Image (spheres, rainbow, N blue to C red):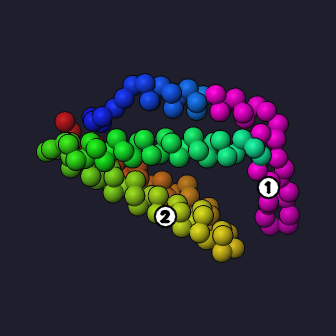
Amino acid sequence: MCKGYKRNIAIIISAITMILLVGFGIDDFYVKDIVINNNSFTYELGAGYVVVLFSTAAIILYGTTLLIRSIITQTGLVRKKLLIITAGIVSYVLAALLTVVLLPALNIIPYSLLDIPETLLFIVPAAFAMIKYKA
């Protein structure tokens, strides 16, 4: 369904991600220290965090590029399905940025627990599109 998929790029990105998973077994690689206070916690990031950040950004950029290219080149039911799924992705990303990034930065913590139910903003439109526009 995705147009412009390049196998070599996908293999390289997947290999880098698999290598980065090994970092979870190394102490202080991603997170150096976690301090738990009365009602909250703080943490200090390790050197591997930057690497994971760039890897995640590469995956998101590559996936977004493929999605946009597919929406532009597809027609009919496939295009409608991709547009609905994209609307779900965008709504989920905006809600997650608000509750996980912006509000905690403003020291408004209670809403950060909404990140799990927010996944319904992606799951429901994706399921709807797949059921309604069976190809």
Residue at 19 percent of width and 42 percent of height: 74
Return the residue at label 2.
Answer: 95
Give 135 or 34, whichever is nearer the viewer: 34
Helix, strand or loop status at disc 1: strand
Residue 42 figure quarter: bottom right
| Quadrant showing the N terminus | top left
Residue 84 at least partly seen: yes
Q: As drawn, is 39 to the left or to the right of 110?
A: right
37 falls in the magenta region: yes
Give 12 or 92, whichever is nearer the viewer: 12
10 Å crowding of disc 2: few (<14), some (14-19), many (20+): some
Report the disc number at residue 26. Answer: none
Q: As drawn, is 127 to the left or to the right of 14?
A: left
Q: Amino acid at mark 1?
A: Tyr
Q: Which residues are magenta?
A: 19-45
Q: Position of residue 111 (x, y in %)?
A: 61, 68
Residue at 47 percent of width and 25 percent of height: 11
Residue 110 at least partly seen: no
Give 119 or 89, whichever is nearer the viewer: 89
97 falls in the magenta region: no
| Quadrant showing the C terminus | top left
Residue at 69 percent of width and 45 percent of height: 49
Residue at 86 percent of width and 64 percent of height: 37
Q: Earlier in the sequence, mark 2 or mark 1?
A: 1
Q: As drawn, is 107 to the left or to the right of 57?
A: right
Q: Amino acid at mark 2?
A: Ala
Report the disc number at residue 43. Answer: 1
Q: Is residue 73 above or below residue 95?
A: above
10 Å crowding of disc 1: few (<14), some (14-19), many (20+): few
Q: Position of residue 35 (x, y in %)?
A: 85, 57
